[in-house]
Image (cartoon, rainbow, N blue to C red):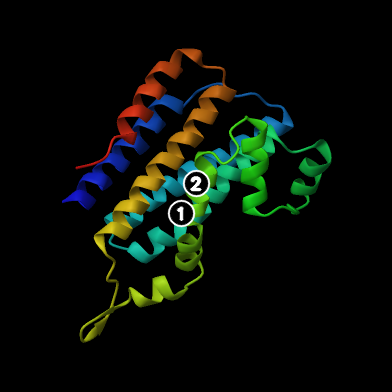
Amino acid sequence: MQVATEYSALVDVVRWIDDHTAGITLPADERSQIAIGCYDVALEHQAAIAVLHSSELYGSALAMLRVLSESLVRGLWLHGCASETELKKFKKGRLEKSFDMLVQEYEARIGTPNGVLSGFKLSAWKQMNDFTHTGFLQVSRRHQPGKVEGNYPDQDLKNALGAAGALGLIAAGQLIAIAERQDLLPMFMAKMSSYAKPVV
């Protein structure tokens, strides 16, 4: 039942984000546009995780979580930290920093070293890599007695759905901030707070 509740909460968040960010006016400067593109990709990945879960394609849903994380963190770093030279390199397909470096530089920039993103990376990065790159965690969940098919523990699914919801909300919050829509901030903060409460 907890997985079903977490899935419903994710679908609700995806709809809420769409309802509150569709049609907002966004700046057209290059740095903002690049970051906005990252956040939009993150939100698409968030919705894709919900769709994959509803189709019982759990392995693919779990594999998408790392991609969602990278889209969000790249957007945060490109908007808040990247130099003009680094933006130019990114436009040429080069980003010469690890995920860990992007997180550290972004958190240092906003004054929260070893913050939420660092904690998320520390607790989930190895598992996300394993699911994305067909490591043992992914492969070992393809077996049931007498057949080969997905066999994912509820905790894996619940964690992935919850993380997808939270990461997507962060991306949506960035879009609201870039759009300078202070009128949406109280609703956004209330949604973040209600989503952060444990699902029972």
Residue at horizontal 51 percent and vertical 53 percent from the top: 122
In-front residue for pair 35/115: 115
Q: Secondary structure beneath disc 2?
A: helix
Would residue 13 appear left or right of 126 to someone viewing this image? left
Label 1 neighbour load within 10 Å: few <14, some 14-19, many 20+: few
Q: Is 20 placed above or below 129 here?
A: above
> Could you tell me residue 170's position as x and y percent?
48, 35
Q: Which residue is mark 2?
A: 119
> Could you tell me residue 113's position as x and y percent?
60, 38
Residue at horizontal 49 percent and vertical 29 percent from the top: 173
Q: Is 160 placed above or below 127 here?
A: above
Q: Which residue is mark 1?
A: 123
Residue type, label 1: Ser
* Residue occupying the far bottom of the picture: 146
- In which image quadrant can residue 149 be found? bottom left
In-front residue for pair 70/175: 70
